[in-house]
């Protein structure tokens, strides 16, 4: 397991999604969001390389998509919520993206997030 | 005359929806039982006050909007707000209902107070609303909703102060309203 600074708000721990990132990731986001359509998901799953070849992506972007390099995609300007459409299509979730960013397995990520809850204030509401 | 009967803040997540659907089949995962139990007071309160409308300030997650045209504020004015397909396929739950007459009324009030917004006559809604709604109101949903989507995805974000205007406006909107007699409660 890599060392993660859970308190850091700087990259690679946290990315603020800005306008320039949105411009850089324009084609990646358009590709990812095309996967909201079931027929496009089916086409992507049937032949990912053929599908992405129609999306005006660079070889490096295609490579990151096929390797499920979620962190790389984020750094290239894809938005987390767009990347999530790719992950959903290949049967993954936010856990997989988060674990990839933190450099750990999904199981390690889940065990690091115990989801504690202290309870509601007395007498609520 | 209209009246604001209350408000609540609530978190949202895609897994919340998945868990609800699974829970309906046969008991909640213990991790989620706490969440489910904790919402029962909210559900009971909503059943007690019986609002005529629910105004929902939420955010879309690139499920209706894309960055080709991405509004800072967007008001949904439609009879129905279909569920967005977020990549996993739609869940088997009913559609949220809207009330266009109320939506246009609120739109007029907001814009007249210089709260300029995008109006969507078609708006698919994602887990920003659908994930928690079944926990606090039983389906099928008879209470119409008025969704106000706020940009929470890409900087610059609107400041929290900006949202004081619609909340103030919704207070001001009701007594001044020319319109619908059914606006008893919000």
Image: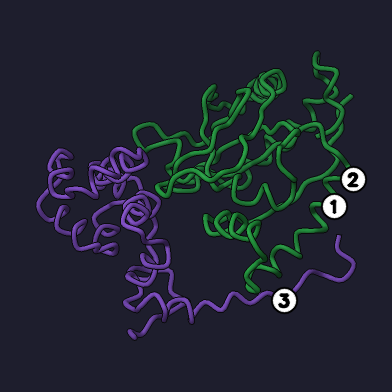
Chain colours: A purple, B green
Q: Which residue is mark 2?
A: B48
Quadrant position of the C terminus of chain B in the picture: top right
* Residue A7: % across, % down: 47, 76
> Which residue appears farthest toward the top when viewing the image?
B178
Tell me how many marks there are: 3
What's the residue at 52%, 25% (across, down)? B122
Q: Which residue is mark 3?
A: A118
* Residue A12: % across, % down: 33, 70
Secondary element at image label 1: helix
Depth check: A65 or B184 in front? A65
What's the residue at 12%, 43% (across, down)? A53
In 3D space, how far apart are the residues under numbered discs 1 and 2 (Cα atoms)? 6 Å
Quadrant position of the N terminus of chain B in the picture: top right
What's the residue at 83%, 25% (across, down)? B183
Depth check: B164 or B49 in front? B49
> Which residue appears farthest toward the left when viewing the image?
A59
Give residue B179's quadrant in the image: top right
Secondary element at image label 3: loop
Q: State whether discs 2 and 3 lie on one chain.
A: no
Disc 1 crowd, CA 10 A, few/some/many (<14, 14-19, 20+): few
B125 left or right of A125? left
Q: Name the chain letter of the residue that bears numbered label 2.
A: B
Q: Which residue is mark 1?
A: B44
A29 left or right of B2? left
Secondary element at image label 2: helix
Select label 2 or label 3 by which is in front.
2
Depth check: A22 or B181 in front? B181
Depth check: B128 or B136 in front? B136
Disc 3 crowd, CA 10 A, few/some/many (<14, 14-19, 20+): few
Please report contact status of discs 1 and 3: CB closer than 8 Å, yes or no.
no
């Amino acid at each position: 397991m890599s060392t993660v600074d859970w308190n850091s708000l700087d990259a690679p721990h946290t990315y603020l999604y800005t306008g320039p990132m949105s411009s850089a990731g324009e084609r990646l986001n358009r590709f990812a969001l095309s996967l909201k359509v079931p027929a496009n998901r089916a086409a992507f799953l049937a032949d990912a390389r053929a599908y992405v070849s129609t999306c005006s992506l660079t070889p490096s972007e295609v490579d990151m998509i096929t390797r499920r390099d979620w962190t790389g995609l984020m750094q290239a300007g894809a938005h987390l919520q767009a990347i999530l459409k790719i992950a959903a299509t290949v049967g993954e979730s936010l856990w997989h993206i988060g674990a990839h960013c933190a450099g750990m397995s999904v199981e390690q990520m889940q065990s690091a997030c115990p989801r504690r809850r202290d309870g509601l204030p007395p007498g609520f509401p | 005359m209209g009246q604001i009967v209350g408000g609540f803040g609530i978190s949202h997540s895609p897994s919340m929806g998945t868990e609800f659907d699974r829970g309906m089949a046969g008991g909640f995962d213990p991790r989620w039982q706490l969440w489910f139990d904790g919402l029962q007071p909210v559900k009971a309160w909503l059943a007690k006050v019986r609002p005529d409308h629910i105004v929902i300030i939420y955010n879309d997650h690139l499920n209706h909007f894309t960055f080709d045209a991405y509004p800072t504020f967007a008001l949904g004015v439609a009879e129905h707000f279909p569920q967005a397909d977020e990549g996993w396929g739609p869940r088997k739950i009913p559609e949220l209902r809207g009330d266009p007459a109320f939506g246009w009324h609120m739109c007029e009030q907001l814009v007249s107070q210089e709260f300029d917004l995008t109006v969507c006559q078609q708006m698919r809604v994602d887990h920003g609303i659908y994930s928690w709604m079944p926990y606090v109101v039983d389906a099928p949903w008879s209470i119409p909703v008025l969704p106000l989507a706020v940009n929470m995805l890409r900087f610059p974000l609107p400041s929290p102060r900006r949202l004081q205007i619609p909340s103030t406006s919704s207070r001001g909107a009701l007594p001044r309203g020319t319109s619908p007699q059914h606006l008893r409660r919000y």
